[in-house]
Image (spheres, grey):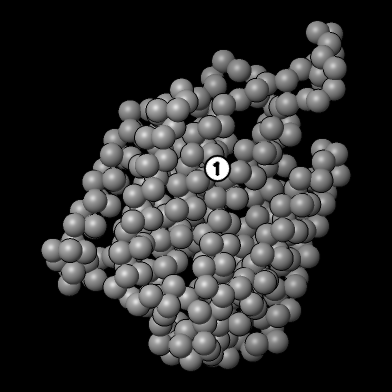
Amino acid sequence: MIPFFRLIRVKNLLAILLAMLGVAYFLHKENPYVVIDFHPFHYGLLICSTLIIAAAGHIINDYFDLKADRINKPEELVLTKYMAKRWAILANWILNILGFFIAVVLSWYYQTLLFVFVHLLSINLLWFYSAYWKRKLLLGTAVLAALPGLVLFLSSWFFQVLNEQSGPYSPYLESTWSSYLDYRFIYFVAICAFFINLSREIIKDIRDIPGDSLIDAHTIPRKIGSQKASLLALLILQLPAVLFLLLQLLTDFSLPSTYAGIVLSLLELLFLAGLGAYFFAPHLLEQRLRLLPTIALILGLTCLYF
């Protein structure tokens, strides 16, 4: 059973779970005096369907990556070592059908195609990424980096579906009442997650160059070299701070808590230190580069809770 957990990337699924729970907690915490329509069981179904489809995506990714993984990480192999390839395909189909069925139920109940559309899009993106796009320069990396942010958008859209009514308002009919919540910080975290995951994928591709060369995957590190790819990853990590400054200058956007401000400041100092290490301590950076996006993602998620 443990190898199967490794196959579906339990740590990644846990991050998705914490992100979706964090959105619900954040919206209730930031709006203590607002009546928010929220159905915990249905939100739990949405979380389950998202986790199921993500797990299916991890399985199919390992299926198509088998040849490269024998070179890049032979000690972490699950397929062919603990599970036959045909069972991986079957598990992918079963999980996708189950996750999509839950989305159909939610879409039917709330009379919206939103959940069906997002889940069907995710299933297809994960399949085409694993089968074709991963070997395309930038396309596969961008697609994979966008999916974690999509989880935060999906969680916010659940609340919008439940709380924002499109029909005519009547003070006598509670079903026509709307609660318009502020989702801007969640969207900000989602966009930052895209930048951080984009950097993370580039860094991961640097490590995977030997196996990617074997399958002729056109990754960024193979195209421009590992040194320039490291610099590009570090520059991308500066973009959340740039985005925040632009929002401050052009809109009335503000951080929800002092904690969020401290985290953002600490992360930017960490990213600047990484950029400085690229020029002055490259050997030290080479050992620690992979930790920067991971630390950023963990701390970024905590901003939804504190």
In this rendering, is residue 134 above or below 292?
Answer: below
Query: Between residues 248 and 94, which one lies in front from this camera angle?
Result: 248
Q: Position of residue 119 (x, y in %)?
A: 72, 56
Apparent side of residue 296 relative to residue 101 in the rendered image (left or right): left
Quarter placement of the N terminus:
bottom right
Quarter placement of the C terminus:
top left
In this rendering, is residue 213 above or below 26?
Answer: below
Apparent side of residue 285 relative to residue 217 in the rendered image (left or right): left
Q: Where is residue 31, by image quadrant?
A: top right
Query: Between residues 81 and 180, which one lies in front from this camera angle?
Result: 180
Identified by mark 1, the residue type is Leu
Query: Between residues 66 and 43, which one lies in front from this camera angle?
Result: 66
Q: Dot 1 lies on which element?
A: helix
According to the picture, the residue beneath numbered tag 1 turns out to be 21
Residue at image position (46%, 22%) is 252
- Report whether residue 59 is seen: no
Q: Position of residue 301 (x, y in %)?
A: 44, 45
